[in-house]
Amino acid sequence: MITELNERSREIFRYIVSSYLDTGSPVGSRTISKSIDLNLSPASIRNTMADLEEMGLLAAPHISAGRLPTERGLRLYIDGLMEIGALTKQERLRIEAECNIKGLSINEVIANASGMLSNLSACASLVIAPKIEKPVKQIQFVNLEPGKALIIMVMQNGMVENRIMDIPRDLPETALIQASNFLNSKLNGQTLQEIQGTIALDIKDNKTQLDKITANLVAKGIAVPLGKEQNDSRIIIRGQSHLLEDVKAIEDLERARTLLGYLEEQKNMLKLVDNVSHAQGVQIYLGAENEIFDQSGWSMILSPYRNADEKIVGAIGVIGPTRLDYDRIIPMVDYTSQVIARLVDDY
């Protein structure tokens, strides 16, 4: 659609959107005629604005008011007319400092980054934290007491993780030994997540030589939830109060509360990873474009981050009103995701 706009229409449209993002107020033809040098009368500008409105790019909140960009208009502006700014040296250093605090776990680092991003952008921030899965070198099942077994996992990097699982009280020691031997023969430097499907299929198709008791033990052992550090805080949200700062009407307050409710539902937010699983770079969702909460008036800027194998393991971004400082926040989100991506494989 950008090619359908002549130079005059582009300049007027760009000014209206830029002014709206700065002030949140409608823009009238007289203001435009005084602000940009087009040698056009307010009447000529009004005609151009009417054409832009007919194209679905502008709308009038009231009959006698100026014009505001629609979500369709904002999309056109972001994709075709906006000039992305650059982060200052101080902003880059602050982001790196918040993401490189020694002695913190990966989730603590990401929580810091999320809070920092919220403060810098004056928006709510969200992080979908990575699920850290390291290749396993060896597994051993050890009988703790009747009804309890300890799973000892030695990772390829030398780290050791212990998990406790429930077992039948009369489970023989030989079953624990056989289960350990079977899993160790299948690992081959893979993560548990990577071998789960193969093992489940082998057991289902009776390709293994395991008896039923041991097969159940194997299946249960590799399905034990990850430890607290790796499994908790999959969704980290900071700065929800920012969503209420620009609210001026009761209906806006209710919409903001509804949005906050969606953000607290982890199943909703985890869908975002699926949405960006094939994305390159920063993704921008405007209002009803976002199938997660499908509300006009809100925008989300989200950037996935990848591990060393180029697999998307999480995402970081901000949510705020449609009137965001896009050219400043987009590079901020992008740079933060790049820094986090560099850190993920160190944990």
Image (cartoon, grey):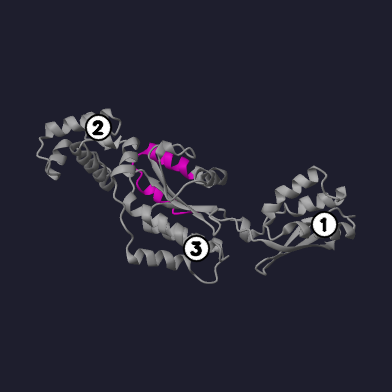
Task: Give the foreground label among 3 and 2.
Answer: 3
Amino acid bearing label 3: Arg
Q: Which mark is residue 135?
A: none
Indicate the position of residue 122 as horizontal and vertical percent values.
37, 54
Amino acid bearing label 2: Leu
SS for dot 1: helix
Q: Is residue 60 magenta?
A: no
Pointer 2 residue: 52
Pointer 3 residue: 342
Pointer 1 residue: 179
Locate residue 326 relative to residue 132 in the image: left or right: left
Indicate the position of residue 167 as horizontal and vertical percent values.
82, 54
Of label 1 and label 3, which has the lower sequence position? 1
Magenta highlight: main SS: helix
Query: Which stretch did the figure color magenta?
Result: 237-260
Say which quadrant the C terminus sits in.
Answer: bottom right
Circles 1 and 3: CB distance less than 8 Å?
no
Tell me the CA gap for discs 1 and 3. 37 Å
| Closer to the camera in the image, 321 or 230 | 230
Indicate the position of residue 172 as horizontal and vertical percent values.
90, 57
